[in-house]
Image: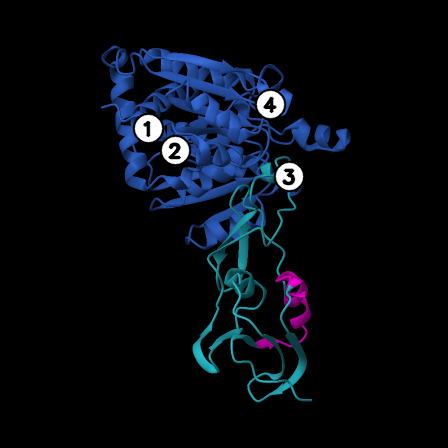
Chain colours: A blue, B cyan
Amino acid sequence: MENLIDIRDLSVDEIQELVRVALDIAADPSRYSEKCRGKKLATLFFEPSTRTRLSFEAAMYELGGNVLGFSEAQSSSASKGESVSDTARMVSCYADIIAMRHPKEGAPLVAASKASVPVINAGDGGHNHPTQTLTDLLTIWREKGRLSDLTIGLCGDLKFGRTVHSLVAAMSRYPGIRFILISPEELRVPGYIRKDVMTANGIPFEETTDFVSAMPQLDVLYMTRVQKERFFNEADYIRLKDMFILTPEKLAYAKEDLCIMHPLPRVNEIATAVDDDPRAAYFRQALNGKYIRMALIMKLLGVK
Amino acid sequence: MVIDAISNGIVLDHIKAGRGMDLYQILKLDKLECSVALLKNVTSRKMGRKDIIKIDEVIDLNFDVLGYVDPGITVCIVKDGKLDRKFTVGLPERVTNVIRCRNPRCITTVEPEIPHIFKLTDRENRVYRCIYCESRAKNRD
């Protein structure tokens, strides 16, 4: 593996190896504190994403490395009209590895084709966000002890939520997976995900608007935010954003060992009263994001 | 109608009827100095009707373009009056700068130097997708 652009670039075995290293890091992070001494990560964030950027930076610092970069296009040479290709070539002279976030789909792939150092896609528009998917897989592994034989509920914006699409694609490669897709009619999962991913892989799924009835069946519940920026019409946004809110009352119908996940940031789709429930894994999920990025940086830099 | 046989050149046979002019333009055959014949609606036992293009010179042709426009085309390369090579082009695995990505969110829309590359993702349904954003190309059929 030279770059990570799309979660499908990784085989099941490669994912398992990253999860294994991340688990080892989580068990004793101090053993990894010098692994990337003298190495530099460039975080090229052409659009703001505090969470992902901080996670990458924290990962590199914990490995003993250094970080340089920018957090929005305005403070980069892109504002002067520099192409992604030229930026990638230039940054390759200064850094050992690049994490790139860009509003345009495919920008990290273009960068990877020109850079002489590994490139990690840290999110390209509404397209791919493979390190979020790796974070989700590590979280499921740590919370459930397996990535197979699970009923996974996906709830909220299943139409525009790229984390949902990537997670479905990634989990469809494991045996015994079943999905329950909980969303308003307007935000159903796109047809190509149903046909090309789930149906093509023989993955059983059902679509429902009945959150409470789905709840007792779930091993994992993946909540998503209805994103305001996806709507042209404010009234539609307001109507849809409050349709599925996870509350302690709804959780009363769930299994004792349910794992509740959310890529964050949340708005109101999970009531804060749920946060102290031991089943709420979303802040642990954010921590897992650092561990899996540490494992990924090491792998791409060839550090053992 | 009589079209002279060519002694050194290329014959594109079994073009789906009506596609000949498309190909003539896409391959920029109008820019050639040599003789070029486009025959439309020729009777064919196999196809009913077909188009044929005869080029009176062996030129570099982009077979990926041919295959994308019409994978059933037979290419005959004639040298010294004899058939030198004959083959069917078939669907190419990827095409470069043949299809343009129309997704406004794709990086190709803001950086004109990036080649527009599409790869074949579903041979049965002839689905091509942009390698950058995975948008599906509009089918020619």
Q: Secondary structure at mark 2?
A: loop
Q: Which mark is residue A25?
A: none
x and y, in percent, of residue A239 in the image = 72, 31
Image height of A105 relative to A173, above or below: above
> Residue under mark 2: which chain is it in?
A
At 55% from the left edge and 76% from the top edge, which residue is drawn?
A: B11
Q: Which residue is mark 3?
A: B109
Cα–Cα span, label 3 and label 1: 30 Å
Q: Amino acid at mark 1?
A: Leu
Q: Which mark is residue A3?
A: 2
Residue A123 seen in the figure = yes
Cα–Cα span, label 1 and label 2: 7 Å
Image height of B27 relative to A91, above or below: below
Which sits earlier in the primary sequence, circle 4 or circle 1? 4
At 42% from the left edge and 45% from the top edge, which residue is drawn?
A: A178
x and y, in percent, of residue A122 in the image = 48, 27
Image quadrant occupied by the C terminus of chain A:
top left
Which sits earlier in the primary sequence, circle 1 or circle 2? 2
Q: Are marks 4 and 2 on the same chain?
A: yes
Asked where in the image residue B24 lies, by quadrant, the reply is bottom right
> Residue under mark 4: which chain is it in?
A
Cα–Cα span, label 4 and label 2: 22 Å
Q: Amino acid at mark 3?
A: Thr
